Image (cartoon, rainbow, N blue to C red):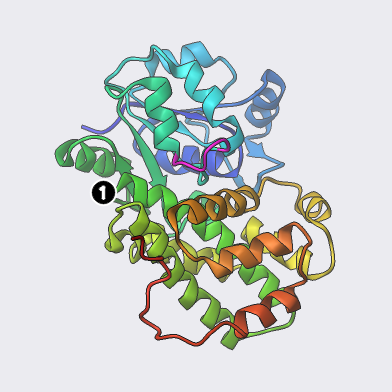
Amino acid sequence: MTFQNITIIGNGAMGTALAINLSKKSAVTLLCRTPQEADEIRDRRINRRYLPKVRIPAQVEISAEKAAALKVADLILIATPVSAFADVLQSLVGIRKAVPIIWCCKGLCASSGETLSIEAERILGAKACFGAFSGPSFAEGLATNEPTAVVVATNRNHKRLLKIASDLSNDSLRVYANSDLVGVQICGAIKNVYAIAAGVIDGCGWRENTRAAMITRAVAEAESYLGAHHCKRSTLMGLSGFGDIYLTCGSRTSRNYQVGMALAAGKNLEQALASIGHVAEGTNAARLILKRAKVLGVDMPLVEAVNDILDGSKTPHECVLALMSREIRHEKESSRKTRH
């Protein structure tokens, strides 16, 4: 038996797309930030700011009444920016323990660089059921029923996890179960950093050779970072890892890719973010991952180069020169430093 009532918190592009897609099997409420936003979307059946090309079917309930929407929910999906994540979780304290809380935001805790599941356990408690929905899934494709495959990872056992994955799947959305909750979240955050790098490459006029080299070394770099967190290599090679890296590094639709393009054109970070008009999670993730990598003893030259470009301390050309001048080593040599 599938989820009967799904409440989605956040009326951005992904929240709206999930509401449209999941309404094929379940009663879905899209919970908006303000009554004004709810009224406009409900009246027009279109989210003009975030997903203007896709009509929202009548069976999707549009609301700003949070208490009522949560009362009937047997699944809660969080589709807000990472910056709102902790506040949203605080509002869910006391919700029925049997109700899974799954987030679609891809980032890290701003204070520590830890995964969002650490924040979730701290706020909701270890007995709550929570997890992450991740993978190569642009909102418009999800909303228009393009065949899409993602993963869901939770803090529950294999049987419960498979049930959640199965209940979220339909004829255009295939959801795989993944038991590596930490790995899935790290992959979701780190791919945004590499998408910025891909945008920089395109914006500088470099082409396939450079992009292929960057993506390949990004995977190697991410593998060392995941290894330092005791995550599974299969997660990196799966949908939330390589799948999402491939998607966001190869499409100008990615917000993080667009930031990279703007930076290559000579804009500073503030101007780049203003030009796209939306949140680009990779700009914060780059700083947090690099800081944590240094603590863990993981060498991440690509992430470091992205940080240098973001803060304006180096130009893209200077970063590439530094990367190409690094000491030659064996391709399979790990970038994780050995600790004695």
For image coordinates 61% across by 34% down, the residue present is 83
**What secondary structure prevails in the magenta region?**
loop
Q: Is residue 90 above or below residue 196?
A: above
Q: Residue at x 32, y 15 (%)?
A: 96
Q: Is residue 76 visible?
A: no
Spot occupied by residue 162 in the image (x, y as percentages of width and height): 20, 43
Quadrant housing residue 94: top left
Secondary structure under badge 1?
Answer: strand
Residue 304 appears at what percent x and percent y? Answer: 61, 64
Residue at image location 49% in from the left, 70% down from the top: 218
Residue shown at the point (67%, 45%) measured from the top left:
279
Q: Which residues are magenta?
A: 110-115
**Above or below for 313 versus 287:** below
**Within-10-Å neighbours for mark 1: few <14, some 14–19, many 20+:** many
Q: Measured from the top left, where is residue 210 in percent x and y?
A: 60, 83
Magenta span contains residue 42: no
Looking at the rendering, which quadrant does residue 243 occupy?
Answer: bottom left
Q: Amino acid at mark 1?
A: Ala
Question: Taking the image as drawn, is residue 259 in sight?
Answer: yes
Would you say 224 lies left or right of 319 here? left
Residue carrying label 1? 177
Looking at the image, is 89 positioned above or below residue 199? above
**Residue ranking furthest to the left:** 159
